[in-house]
Image (tube, rainbow, N blue to C red):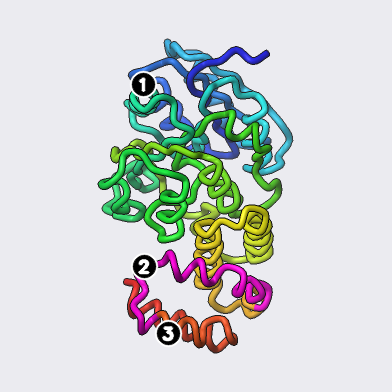
Amino acid sequence: MKKNVPLSIIVPIYNVEKYIGSLVNSLVKQTNKNFEVIFIDDGSTDESIQILKEIMAGSEQEFSFKLLQQVNQGLSSARNIGILNATGEYIFFLDSDDEIEINFVETILTSCYKYSQPDTLIFDHSSIDEFGNALDSNYGHGSIYRQKDLCTSEQILTALSKGEIPGTAWSFVTKRSVIEKHDLLFSVGKNFEDNNFTPKVFYFSKNIVVISLRLYRYRKRPGSIMSNHQEFSDDAIFVIYDLLDFYNQYKNRELGAVVGSLVMTTLVSFPDSKKLYNELNPIRKKVFKDYISIEKRHTKRIKMYVKMYVFSSYVGYKLYRLVKGKHWK
């Protein structure tokens, strides 16, 4: 029987000696200490774990924590280990090169009480560079953060399909029961693993609180996975087909729009991959109607171009990229 705490923070660690100190300090300084942290060492070969141990030993932290270790198996495996060892009513995935604001836990728990234990909470974020300096970026700060407090899963999936909120695992806090009831785990050994995990969480969350505050500090650094789009097309295909299977199971229009959006985003991210285009092309008839019906930003003229050409041929895809570049700045 797991002893509950309000919040479990899951932190996979792999060779982040330059950033682990900032992350741990952001945890130690939390204004509300009613949480646990599960650190998972994913086979680090640098000084990350030594730095972690030194900071934790020298601080007067008032929260519980545990350090689990495994041979290197990747981010997804480490997160899954964290899920299996979590005791909190809610779970939050924190990347080890990022930080959270000192009022993160307090704001989350206050919102949980205010809105009578919602299934999931999402929040805004800010961006920092590798040295911790603030970056002037509006990415992810969609209108939903300013317009809504309590949303349905359909509203959040719609916002996700439009790119108004990020699909990252660090962009939300969710009930552990949502994850456990539906056997949600990350795809092990795959990049882009957030893309087929986050939509499932949102789908199964019937009431979602939107917090307008920027509670998360996302670090943009050279060499990170999301900064290098090279040999990841196979993983992208796997993730999209997994999410397509999920869509086929539940036949939800908003899920279909998310799949369609993910297909288009992936194609744009790999503009020279004809193989990728050919692999994703069969999805078009299954989800494109949902994608167009949700994606209100398209003008009638752009809709016509997209419907006529985008999914008909590789040349059509190239035309989509040209049109998108002109109309979606």
On the image, the x and y values in percent for residue 129 come to 36, 48
User: Could you tell me which residue is drawn at 53 percent across and 61 percent down?
Assistant: 228
Three-letter amino acid code at the position of disc 3: Met
- The residue that label 2 is drawn on is 296
Three-letter amino acid code at the position of disc 2: Lys
Quadrant containing the N terminus in the rendered view: top right
On residue 289, the disc is none
Provide the secondary structure element on which disc 3 rests.
helix
Three-letter amino acid code at the position of disc 1: Lys
Q: Which residues lie in the magenta part?
A: 278-302
On the image, the x and y values in percent for residue 234 come to 68, 64
Q: State the CA–CA distance, disc 2 to disc 3.
A: 14 Å
Provide the secondary structure element on which disc 2 rests.
loop
In magenta segment, residue 210: no
- The residue that label 1 is drawn on is 29
Provide the secondary structure element on which disc 1 rests.
loop
On the image, the x and y values in percent for residue 35 come to 47, 19
Q: Is residue 195 visible?
A: yes
Decide which of 53, 327 is in the foreground and name it.
327
- The residue that label 3 is drawn on is 304
> Foreground mark, 1 or 3?
3
Side of 256 relative to 217 (left or right): right
User: Could you tell me which residue is drawn at 50 percent across and 65 percent down?
Assistant: 261
Q: In the rendered structure, are the residues bearing label 1 and label 3 in contact, judged by CB atoms less than 8 Å apart? A: no
Upstream in sequence: badge 1 or badge 3? 1
Upstream in sequence: badge 1 or badge 2? 1
Q: State the CA–CA distance, disc 1 to disc 2.
A: 42 Å
Q: Main secondary structure of the magenta part?
A: helix
Decide which of 14, 259 is in the foreground and name it.
259
On the image, the x and y values in percent for residue 318 come to 50, 84
> Foreground mark, 1 or 2?
2
Q: Is residue 25 visible?
A: no
